[in-house]
Amino acid sequence: MNIADAIMEKPIGFTIGNRHFCLYPVTLGKIYLLSRLMKTIGFNQEILKANPFMEALRVCREHTGAVCRMLAYCTMRRKEDVFNERKVQALANMLSEELDGDELARLLLMAISWDDAETYVKHFGLDRERVLRQRIRKLKESGGSISFGGLSTYGTLIDFACQRYGWTMDYVVWGISYVNLRMLMADAITSVLLSKEEQRKLRIPQDTTFINADDMANMQKIMAMDWD
């Protein structure tokens, strides 16, 4: 369900008095804004992993202004609103006045869960595929080819997305959620032509035989296999 919510970019709603707000999935642009505030706040990562709510309470108590500013960014969907300093500060002040520590801590924990992409990558087994891609790239480079670029966010995310999908840079940075952008990059369909020699070096089976293990007639073949 979390993956489905990520694909739909489903916001999380909350109410203050008679006003309704939403925490929207963060974009790449918001990631950079929030990261600066995260450094200012100074989360204790060990405590955050062991007892996230306790650490969130401490942060909300000691850095109320920065926390409320982070939440203000997360409740704004448009780039124009995020860069409107008066709107951001007015909303941050209202959150500080209307919400207590527990409420701020709960919203903060939801707001900083933007890095779920790596969890989804492991869930789908894309981390193992990523290792194989790296091995193939190294093998290809040793065969005479050479690659440049891909050393920053410009090459690894923005340029790739713009070229593949025809999106503008503004949409990549501010339009699509960071999780969806990461997952599109991680699970993009690519094909690499490998020679038999390259397959041998990568230990990729060239001839695969499927045996029906439910058929008792194949039992001798199964028992004779080298399981090492």
Image: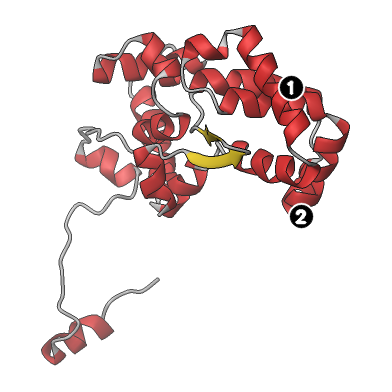
The numbered dot on residue 50 is 2
Residue 142 visible in the snapshot: yes
Q: Is residue 147 visible?
A: no
Q: Secondary structure at mark 2?
A: helix
**In the image: residue 111, left or right of residue 77:** right
- Please state the horizontal and vertical placement of residue 119, each as a whole percent of the image: 50, 48
The mark lying in front, picked from 2 and 1, is 1
Disc nearer the start of the sequence (2/1)? 2
Q: Amino acid at mark 2?
A: Ala
> What is the quadrant of residue 101 in the picture?
top right
Which of these two is toward me, 110 or 197? Answer: 110
Position of the C terminus by quadrant: bottom left
Viewer-closest of 118 and 76: 76
Give the secondary structure at mark 1: helix
What residue is shown at x 60% (from left), y 22% (from top)? Answer: 73
Across and down, in percent, residue 164 comes to: 26, 20
The residue pinned by badge 1 equals 93
Tell me which residue sits at (15%, 66%) in the image. 209
